[in-house]
Image (cartoon, rainbow, N blue to C red):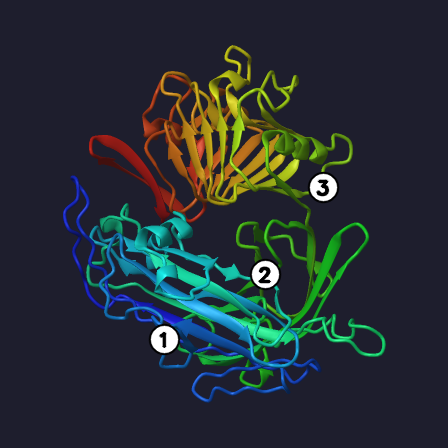
Amino acid sequence: MLFFFLHMLRKGNFMKRIHTKRALLLSSISLLLCISMLVGTTFAWFTDSVTSGRNQIVAGNLDVTLEYWDGSAYKEVTSATKLFDDTAYWEPGHTEVAYLKVGNAGSLALKYQLAVNVYNEITGINQAGEEFKLSDYLVFKVVDKEITSEADLYTREEAITAAGKAMGLTSFNSGDKALLNTGDANYVALIIYMPTTVGNEANHNGTAPSIELGTTVVATQATAEQDSFGSDYDENATYPAVIAGNKPSGEALALTAGNVKVTIPASAPEAPYTLKIDNANSETNADNETTLSLDINLYKGDEKVQPDGTTLYDVEIFIGTNAHIVGLTHNGSVIADWHYDPAAGYISFKTDSFSPFVITFMAKTTVVNSAAELQKAILDNADKENGPEHQTIILSNDIVLDGTSEMMFTDSNGAPLYLYHNDITLDLNGHSIVAEADVLKPGKNYANAVLLVRYSTLNIIGDGQIIAKNQSMPVYGWAHSTINIYGGTYVSNAYERNESAVYVNNATVTINVYGGDYSGYAFNVHDNCGTTPVIVLHEGIVCEKFFKNGTTDVIQSDINNGRIVAAEGCEFVTYTENGVEMLKVVKS
């Protein structure tokens, strides 16, 4: 396990920015590195282990290595390796990059997974006396990047561009990566920076926040070598999945084994805990349904954890991004209260006991390169009779809706992208969708929407843009739909009409906003919605103003009417910045 300890050691002050911003001297980041890949005795497959300090390599000639770029060459990672400057004063704009190399130094083909998770975090108190998490104000990204010389290193601007703008440290899992031959290697860059938009909300007053990041690399056999019957004898090889840790009194402890993370709450007894995945099987049927079975066991000392009537454990399982969850059971009983993040690929839930968990999910992905391909993918997904199969649509290029290459939907009175009985995750993938003025055909009922959503489920992920011109809207929730926005930039040029970046016309629509940037009027709810909450803003959302039905741009009016609400456990904070009324969502 690779532990990065990010600890705020000194109180700093922001340099004064326009009206409200002062330069931030946050405390230094200290990152202590150790890697562990541990072999459970219940596995019969060849696996590999690397333990910091001892640098233990076991299990035959399956040999995976981890190295870092030291400025001139890749060198072996040890417990003394410092990937980041632990004497740095973190402030807006500060950026650091670490370059890693995962290599196959053995004679056997292998596959590995590299995972990065937030294990533990302690909140701080800012200058206003409010609690805050440092993780909410840092951008963290893992990207593919090979370094062969100093010329290949990112500049600060290049690193920030590669990392994107989504603040908040999120879990990362590379999925299966194969290194089939001796000498094969994969290269990644770990990027952390603090955006220049961060202000005193993250300037601690002496009560410093801290973060513990953990990275786990696990390896096992890959299907490559032949025997007398073919190369499939190791197709079901599983990753080693055993991890242990000592839980201090009054503090939470997070353990990750393989693709499973279990967080032991602060209220649980102080003790050594061990997380074991004793069996892991994955099967996909002819209907493209994947069933993942995991025998998860948590031990306190030598005893298996049993229900005590009060303690609940948080469980996160990585199943891959953009999946559609069919069902989740524990010991044959259905777990109804779960959350799946299609951008991060984790399903999360709470449990009071452990043993067999079964997750059934489906995945369908279509890559599109043009407006016509995007519209065809939407049409192909629609199913008015039986309900659509979940599909992920990934943009591989910027798309311009100019009225020449795409069809116009008659049902939507001219909206270029019309979801009707769809179930889609739209991955902007760093690209943009730009709707030119003549596409939107002003004067038709819904022609001023780029994405018009009706009787559908839509998830939007990926750092990209949806730009609507000529007083038009990027996202329009029409009726009987759920829209989840996880990231991206949404630009509306509507300043005189009742459009906005995100618009809801009917109380049968729910829009959850988890991230993203919004230009123009941010959120607008039509009076048809009454006092029904239809837009739910989650922690970290900041916007300039709401736009209420073409008549009012006062933020508080829509909040009081109950149409736009903060997520559970959060609250709105309104403030004035440079003469503009602003709103942000913080933990309550």
Q: Position of residue 209 (x, y in %)?
A: 30, 63
Binning the other alpha carbons within 10 Å of mark 2 as few (below 14), some (14 to 19) or many (20 upward) gives: many
- Residue in view at x 64 percent, y 75 percent: 220
The residue sitting at 27% across, 70% down in the picture is 86
The reply to whether the C-beta atoms of the residues labelled 3 and 1 are less than 8 Å apart is no
Q: Residue at x 53, y 19 (%)?
A: 439
Looking at the picture, how far across and down is residue 393, in whole percent? 61, 41
Q: Secondary structure at mark 3?
A: loop
| Secondary structure found at label 2 | strand
Kindly identify the amino acid type of the residue bearing the numbered disc 1. Answer: Leu
* Amino acid under disc 2: Phe
**Sequence-wise first label, 2 or 1:** 1
Would you call the spot at circle 3 few (<14 residues within 10 Å), some (14-19), or many (20 or more)? some
User: Mark 2 or mark 3: which comes first in sequence?
Assistant: 2
Question: Could you say which is closer to the camera, residue 310 or residue 227?
Answer: 227
Mark 3 → mark 1, Cα distance in angstroms:
45 Å
Which numbered dot is residue 32?
1
Horizontal arrangement in the rendering, residue 538 relative to residue 18 (left or right): right
Q: Find the distance from the CA under tag 2 to the CA under tag 3.
A: 21 Å
Q: Nearer the viewer, mark 3 or mark 1?
A: 1
As displayed, is residue 577 above or below residue 287? Answer: above
Q: Quadrant of residue 359?
A: bottom right
The residue pinned by badge 2 equals 318
Q: Which mark is residue 389?
A: 3
